[in-house]
Image (cartoon, rainbow, N blue to C red):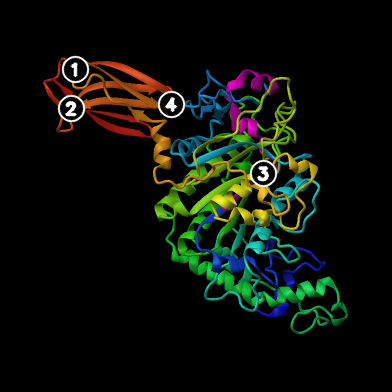
Amino acid sequence: MKRRNFLKSVPLAAGGAFAINSIPMHILAKENRILRAAELDDNDRVLVIIQLHGGNDGLNSVIPVNQYDLYYNLRPNIAIPAKNSARRYIPLDSTFSDESKLVGLHPDMTGVKSMYDTGKINIVQGVSYPKNNGSHFRGRDIWLMGAGFDRYEDSGWVGRYLSKQYAPEKYPDDFPNANMLDPLAIELGSDVSLLFHQKGNIPTSVSLPNNPEAFVEVLNGLVGFDDVELDPRGLPPAYLKDSPYYKEMEWILGLEDKTEQYAERLLNVYNNAPATSVPYPETYPFSAPKSYQRNGLSGQLQVVSRLISGGAKTKVYMVKIGGFDTHADQVESHDATMGLHAALMYHISSAMQAFQADLRARGIEDRVVTMTISEFGRRIKSNGSYGTDHGKGGPMFLFGKYVKGGVTGHNMDLTGSPSNVDMQYDYRQIYANLLHDWLKVPKDQLGGLNDGIVMGSNTDTNFYDGPKEDGDGFYKPLNLIDETITGTEGFFNERFSLRNAYPNPTKGQTTMSFFINSEAMVNLKIMDIKGKTVKTVIQEKKSPGEHQVQVNLADLEPGMYFYKIEAGLLQETKKIIVQ
């Protein structure tokens, strides 16, 4: 590829985002500190961020079961049914003693429910930032900056944190190198993100289409300038030498070769891992706008899983899905459980379920945590257009083998007809917990989240304790990560179990009981020592909760038997003695 050909696709505006055939390349900075991180980091953990563009309606994603009547009255034209419907909300967890934690999921979030039941999801309620003004562009900037509403930073929280953690390294001259062959940050999609900017430096990440092969095809297919006024090497005219544009172009040209090297390296990594053995969902199976029928997350997550499995040292990935600005037609007028928002909930839920299964099949599930972010939630009251307007707080979803399963926070109090979901957690608290508990950043170094930003503003003081000047106050333990071996097993056993029969041994009658946390078809049977079924106790659908049944065993010969339950995720067998 010739230098001047390379320039054809570069925007001719000072400070403009550099893109190749509409695929932006976040150019790595001259004193790149982020790439140095991968060389020095002593863990191979990965953070995946799913950005939900438009502001997700949290109340139709995570439904306040304990206040269902109020919820329904405040949004009657879009409320998810509670009963008497084949597509009613999914009860999430019946084990909570605190009713304010009782929630339901949208009926198309069966994948989330399944992952929750195995202890691999934490739902954090009421996440926002002080004085959220409901602006799309400002809200996204704030979430990506990791700063307060009154800050205007040219850097993102990931870029600042890493640049504070690791010594600067000369780039691009020494990169890629034997210790760091990969970009630390990768974005999939075509948007330019503030997330990976470093203070005073050019952004640091590589943006890719949905697969590395297409990325390489784009690079190899460039055509360029033939303008005779340009320098033969493709540099702008000399009279622009002192302009910011000239300096940026000089930097871009210095990365031309590096760009190709990264593409080839990523393609090699991608091809080093086999194609997934797990089927990813492709389309929404019900009624929704045509443009949202296709699952836009599946392809992105497949690429991420394959790159990690193939050996990429990349630490942070960002994938994106749009369509959440649901002012109108959020639901179908004849069925509130279907439509645009339903399709989006299905896409996230089903793609993430496939992604977790893919990671597990590749043996890398223990290396990855995924979180969702969205610039704001939606209003509590629906509007007359079967939609919702810009709001404030909303839920965040955390996924992963070592995520501590459960719900963090509680349902918003809907009494008094409030207009917005209140903030329970500043989004920076979630970031700080993941940095410390997942990426193992020491607490006294969490100032990198807010490096160079004064934390002691009136809006922040009430939310954090600890030194305001170094950022440690952002970290308040939220117990979002659980690395104990029995963590997910214990979570599951508290929600799905076959109890010990009583009495056992028995001379004729016993009581069998079980607990399930999801509606399921229950098959409870008794087998002899050869595995032959001698009695069917239950064969019917049961609701979540505790169930007991009296079983007459007088017709069985004395001896040892087994009773086995099959109820969705619950598959368990116990022994019983008939005397």
Answer few, some or many: residues within 10 Å of disc 3's Cα (few below 14, many 20 plus, some between 14 and 19): many
Q: Secondary structure at mark 1?
A: loop
Left or right of 27 on screen, residue 104 = left
Nearest to the eye among marks 4 and 1: give it. 1
Q: Secondary structure at mark 4?
A: loop
Residue labelled with disc 1: 553
Q: Provide residue 147's location: percent of width, then percent of height.
A: 74, 50
Q: Which residues are magenta?
A: 48-75
Q: Residue at coordinates 73% horizontally, 35% vertically from top-left?
A: 391
Q: Amino acid at mark 4?
A: Glu
Q: Provide residue 275's location: percent of width, then percent of height.
A: 44, 58
Residue labelled with disc 3: 427
Q: Amino acid at mark 2?
A: Tyr
Left or right of 364 on screen, residue 511 = left
Answer few, some or many: residues within 10 Å of disc 4's Cα (few below 14, many 20 plus, some between 14 and 19): some
Q: CA distance from mark 3 to mark 4?
A: 33 Å
Residue labelled with disc 4: 519
Is residue 575 at least partly visible in the picture?
A: yes
Residue labelled with disc 2: 561
Q: CA distance from mark 4 to mark 1?
A: 27 Å
Answer few, some or many: residues within 10 Å of disc 2's Cα (few below 14, many 20 plus, some between 14 and 19): many
Left or right of 411 on screen, residue 267 = left
* Mark 1 touches mark 2? (CB < 8 Å): yes
Q: Quadrant of residue 388?
A: top right
Nearest to the eye among marks 3 and 4: give it. 3
Q: Quadrant of residue 211?
A: bottom right
Relative depth, front residue between 7 and 407: 407
Of callouts 2 and 4, the N-terminal one? 4
Of callouts 1 and 2, the N-terminal one? 1
Q: Amino acid at mark 1?
A: Leu
